[in-house]
Image (cartoon, helix red, strand yellow):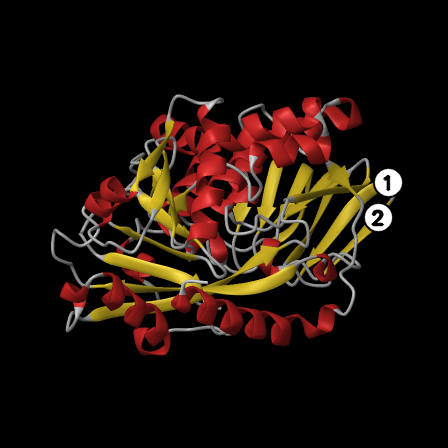
Amino acid sequence: MPLPPSLYADTARPAPETPPLDGDRSVSVAIVGGGFTGLSAALHLAEQGVDVAVLEAHEPGWGASGRNGGQVNPGLKHDPDQVVADFGPDLGGRMVALSGNAPNVVFDLIQRHQIACEALQSGSLRVAIGDRALREVRRSADQWVGKSDKVNFLDREVISGLTGTDRYLGAMLDQRGGQLNPLGYARGMAAAAMQAGAAVHGGTRVSRIGKDGGRWRLTTPTGTVTAEKIILATNGYTDDLWPGLRQSVVPAYSAIAASEPAPEDVMPTRSSLYEIGSITVYYRKDRDHRVLMGGRGVQRDVSRPEELHYLIDYAVRLWPALRGLRWTHGWSGQVAITTDHYPHIHEPDETVLMCLGYNGRGVAMSTAMGPELARRAMGGRAAEIAMPITGVRQIPLHGLWKTAVEARVLYGRVRDYLGL
């Protein structure tokens, strides 16, 4: 399937050659999925001299990794105190440290491998559109300030100056965050992994996984791979390759509209921004001064900006100067949502790892999980990682997810519009 149309598809660095698997081969670790999780794990394994192959059904970055908002946000969905309350001071503390540092992993990797992807560590803004959200943002800022000198709370006047709109009551600025062209980043990471010795095969959908003489056998239309260990990294595009895994997450579409270059007083800061509300809206201004406006959308693939009128209308509400500006691109992709809003790592067998469910924070966290998965794959269960390992839990009534998400998006959009 060809790469879906998007601003990134038109502007990202060229894709490296990732030819389909041709014949049969044997490796130490086989990875299913060529998004950030799989590519980061492959890169970190290959750098340790491990024989690793990535099998991607389309091309690296084809899924949400190459279609997201390009925001490199620190942290998990939950605040640090909640994470520690859920998992205890040891594991919870390590989870907070890993997630807070995750953007640094991204930008350090980009610097080390000289990946051309419009990367800018310009900070992340978590903004409040109502009193309840303001309390939440203040709470988050108070907790992170004690853990990083890169975090501070901004009042209404300051955030108005940074964004060019008076919509927000306050914000948390985390200077560890930033932005990039995600498709360019995925392609650059694939090239870096191959340079380190990993094999990356595009156009290679795995149709079956099974044990064969103590090793895993992965079947594809153009050949087979046998491996000592496997990592499944398919996130929002998880299918039925492993029983029950698809039913453990909710695949929700997130959509983005991109404008032609906007006036300077529209979002003058280059920080990434996401709103705290019933339905998340996120946006940034890219290198070419385009506004990239994103949020939960219709639960289907989108290919034209005209299909995202609600995002464009909201942008004009924020900045009336955008009225009449041409919107050049519109696209969407599926992210994976978990019921507890934590990433899920599963290990149903000592030779199998699965990692998915970043709940909209995938750019930084999926990259940071790469070295964690690599360490666990090589060290086995004696190698601790900074995330909990749980069993695969199927979501009850999973077949109703699409209707439920559409209803929740509509309800939340009305509440946010009314400021509730």
Horizontal relation, residue 147 to residue 336: left or right = left
Query: Image height check: is 75 above or below 326?
Result: above
Between 66 and 50, the one nearer to me in the picture: 66
Classed neighbour count for the residue bearing mark 2: other residues with Cα under 10 Å, few (<14), some (14–19), many (≥20):
few
Residue depicted at 53% across the width and 39% down the height? 365
Element under disc 1: loop
Left or right, 305 with reference to 343: left
Q: What amino acid does circle 2 point to?
A: Lys
Residue that numbered label 2 is attached to: 211
- How many angstroms separate mark 1 from mark 2 (CA)? 6 Å
Tell me the quarter of the picture where residue 327 sits. bottom left
Q: Which of the numbered marks, if any, corresponds to residue 414?
A: none
Residue 196: x and y, percent? 48, 30
User: In the image, what residue occupies the spot 35% across and 31% down?
Assistant: 175
Q: Is residue 119 left or right of residue 40?
A: left
Residue 271, by quadrant, is top left
The residue tagged 1 is 214
Mark 1 closeness class: few <14, some 14–19, many ≥20 residues within 10 Å? few
> Is the Cβ of the residue at disc 1 closer than 8 Å to that at disc 2?
yes
